[in-house]
């Protein structure tokens, strides 16, 4: 790890925190990506098969939030490609990982952005436990991939 990596990580974390605070301040909502996305699909987190209609303002917020995420990703890809990793998983692996993350998100009633950024900042016990679980699972996954499966180094 070098100074550039540390500074970019610090800058990224700062921007994420500022964005979460801005969403909370301007809309009174937690910037939990999974909750925003599932609300866009018209599903209730407690009952995935029960559809609910979203008011137009709520729908506009959700669409704008998600389009902003996509636009930011495309912007970095086009304007600053040197900031992106040089290797990435195959589309199939990324799809499987997305399904697994989505399942875990539904099971845990929240995602890393909702719990790890917004919940921890409010000192919510459930979010602190969820974030510790995310981190432990990530550490175990990296250990297994690097030391036990002969995977990426």
Image (cartoon, rainbow, N blue to C red):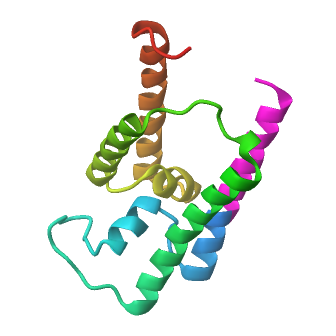
Residue 129, quarter of picture: top left
Residue 121, quarter of picture: bottom right
- In this rendering, the answer to whether 85 lies above or below 77 is above
| Camera-side residue of 103 and 133 | 103
Residue 101, quarter of picture: top left
Magenta residues? 1-18
Q: Is residue 12 left or right of residue 109?
A: right
Q: Residue at x 69, y 49 (%)?
A: 13
Q: Position of residue 84 (x, y in %)?
A: 67, 40
Label the magenta part by its dominant secondary structure.
helix
Q: Residue furthest bottom?
A: 56
| Camera-side residue of 129 and 138 | 138
Q: Position of residue 85 (x, y in %)?
A: 65, 35
Q: Is residue 57 magenta?
A: no
| Camera-side residue of 113 and 91 | 91
Q: Residue at x 31, y 45 (%)?
A: 99
Q: Is residue 26 left or right of residue 28?
A: right
Q: Is residue 141 left or right of residue 44?
A: right
Q: Residue at x 41, y 8 (%)?
A: 148
- In this rendering, the answer to whether 14 lies above or below 24 is above
Q: Position of residue 45 (x, y in %)?
A: 27, 65
């Amino acid at each position: 790890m070098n100074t550039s990596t540390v500074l970019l990580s610090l800058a990224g974390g700062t921007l994420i925190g500022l964005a979460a605070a801005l969403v909370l301040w301007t809309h009174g909502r937690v910037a939990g990506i999974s909750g925003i996305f599932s609300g866009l699909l018209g599903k209730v987190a407690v009952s995935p098969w029960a559809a609910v209609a979203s008011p137009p303002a709520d729908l506009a917020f959700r669409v704008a939030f998600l389009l902003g995420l996509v636009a930011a990703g495309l912007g970095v890809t086009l304007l600053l490609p040197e900031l992106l990793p040089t290797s990435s998983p195959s589309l199939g692996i990324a799809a499987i990982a997305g399904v697994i993350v989505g399942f875990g998100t539904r099971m845990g009633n929240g995602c890393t952005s909702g719990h790890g950024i917004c919940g921890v900042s409010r000192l919510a016990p459930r979010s602190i436990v969820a974030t510790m679980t995310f981190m432990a699972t990530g550490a175990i996954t990296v250990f297994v991939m690097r030391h036990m499966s002969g995977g990426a180094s």
